[in-house]
């Protein structure tokens, strides 16, 4: 291996994709057992590697020189082999500071809360200090060191916090809504009346509950994908011998990060279609999926498959509420387990907030706004089998479709226009 990543469990790493978008080397993913690390570092055959959990500290004794950011954090995520001597860097420092800058601008004079005390939290502390924050507190479940406070204390006594940075795994796949051992949302942002930014290091899902809570209240917020891309972009520049540029040309680094981020985001994000029955969600969805070479999922088809009976029968046996409960389960499962897919939803999927939350976690929502006169009743649609039914639901739901979408697409008779509008928006 000349270039690549070492770590213990790497099946879900995005690093190969990201590096190969910003450099022309081949990047390999290399899982190493702990006992293999010393040999790997003592007789290096690589040109440059990234290092991830749990080896960011393990590799440090093998290094000839360690960059100041890596020293400040106490961990190394990039190692370059120069004539047999190993040089260590930490590009997570730039990754997190680029994300913070994007979400909050400057941290000068700000009061910052960092949630969690693991590796990312150390990076956050180093970055926040370097950015000139006025005060930094670390929030943990059981405070044991100076500068640490509990969640209860943070919510009760630090309501004047400006910026929250989540470095815990709360909200991470597969426990996006939490489970018995982990919360889905680390902290209640409504306890902080002055917040001007929320940064979440979690990138799977793309928008955690914490990020969505903030956005729902008009507070700028973003997940960790931008950080992941930024650290990789900087590592790639160091790997290519462009160390000077990596550490001094912030504009070039940010521009390259933006370019690669847009590509990676588009490849991971789902395209979600909402709209009234017979507005064309399935037809447009299938055509779009085919054009883009993406998987297509129809939540109604999944419901039908799981229940083993048509939707009309589900309605008559379980009533509308029973159907909606099934729909919520399916919407959550489909949203949580797909990336880079096209998802067509049933017309009523927008009715429940929890459905929208799940869809928005991993996707961008397009409302296919087809005029009422083009919506055709059909017998297999229990709530849309007559013109009158459709008109009533259209009037009841119209504002909800608008309020829950990211983009409204006014559809006309020509499907090509709809496909083009979605594609242009999604890839811009
Ligand atoms: C419904 C729409 C249907 C289906 C169910 C309920 C609705 O999907 O989920 O019959 O409440 O609008 P389509 O929008 O694909 O017809």
Image (tube, grey):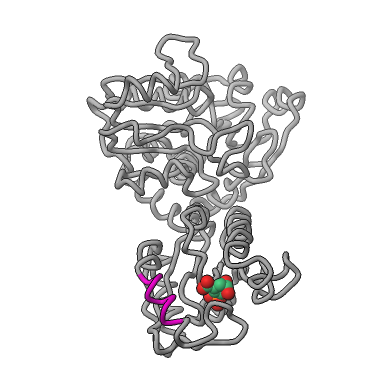
Q: In this orientation, which residue lies closer to the viewer: 225 or 16? A: 225
In the depicted structure, whether residue 338 falls above or below residue 156: below
Q: What quarter of the picture does the N terminus occupy? A: top right
Residue drawn where x is 47% and y is 62% of the image: 351
Magenta residues span: 390-398
At which x and y percent is residue 22? 49, 51
In the depicted structure, whether residue 20 falls above or below residue 223: below
At which x and y percent is residue 386? 51, 87
Report the number of numbered marks. Answer: 0
Q: What quarter of the picture does the C terminus occupy? A: bottom left
At which x and y percent is residue 248? 33, 36
Type of secondary structure dominating the magenta stretch: helix
| 395 drawn magenta | yes
* Image quadrant where residue 51 sits: top right
At which x and y percent is residue 404? 40, 61
Q: In this orientation, which residue lies closer to the viewer: 30 or 41? A: 30
């Amino acid at each position: 291996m000349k270039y690549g990543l070492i770590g213990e469990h790497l099946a879900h790493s995005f690093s190969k994709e990201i590096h190969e978008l910003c450099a022309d080397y081949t990047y390999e993913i290399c899982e190493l057992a702990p006992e293999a690390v010393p040999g790997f570092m003592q007789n290096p055959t690589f040109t440059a590697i990234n290092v991830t959990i749990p080896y960011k500290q393990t590799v440090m004794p093998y290094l000839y020189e360690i960059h100041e950011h890596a020293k400040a954090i106490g961990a190394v995520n990039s190692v370059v082999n120069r004539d047999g001597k190993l040089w260590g860097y930490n590009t997570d420092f730039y990754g997190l500071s680029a994300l913070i800058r994007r979400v909050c601008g400057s941290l000068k004079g700000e009061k910052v809360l960092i949630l969690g005390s693991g590796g990312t939290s150390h990076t956050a502390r180093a970055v926040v200090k370097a950015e000139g924050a006025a005060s930094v507190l670390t929030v943990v479940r059981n405070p044991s060191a100076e500068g640490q406070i509990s969640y209860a204390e943070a919510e009760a006594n630090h309501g004047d916090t400006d910026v929250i940075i989540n470095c815990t795994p709360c909200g991470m796949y597969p426990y996006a809504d939490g489970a018995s051992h982990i919360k889905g949302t680390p902290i209640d942002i409504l306890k902080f009346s002055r917040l001007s930014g929320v940064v979440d290091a979690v990138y799977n899902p793309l928008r955690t509950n914490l990020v969505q809570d903030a956005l729902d209240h008009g507070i700028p917020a973003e997940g960790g994908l931008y950080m992941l891309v930024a650290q990789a972009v900087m590592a790639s520049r160091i790997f290519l011998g462009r160390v000077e540029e990596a550490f001094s040309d912030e504009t070039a680094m940010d521009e390259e990060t933006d370019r690669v981020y847009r590509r990676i985001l588009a490849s991971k994000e789902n395209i979600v279609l909402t709209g009234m029955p017979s507005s064309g969600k399935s037809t447009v969805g299938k055509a779009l999926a085919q054009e883009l070479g993406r998987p297509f999922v129809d939540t109604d088809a999944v419901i039908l498959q799981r229940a083993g009976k048509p939707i009309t029968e589900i309605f008559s046996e379980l009533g509308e509420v029973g159907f909606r409960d099934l729909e919520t389960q399916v919407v959550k499962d489909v949203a949580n387990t797909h990336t880079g897919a096209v998802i067509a939803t049933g017309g009523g999927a927008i009715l429940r907030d929890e459905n929208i939350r799940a869809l928005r976690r991993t996707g961008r929502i397009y409302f296919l706004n087809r005029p009422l006169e083009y919506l055709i009743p059909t017998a297999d649609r229990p709530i849309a089998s007559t013109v009158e039914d459709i008109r009533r639901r259209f009037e009841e739901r119209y504002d909800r479709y608008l309020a829950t979408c990211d983009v409204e697409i006014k559809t006309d008779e020509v499907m090509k226009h709809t496909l083009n509008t979605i594609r242009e928006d999604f890839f811009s």
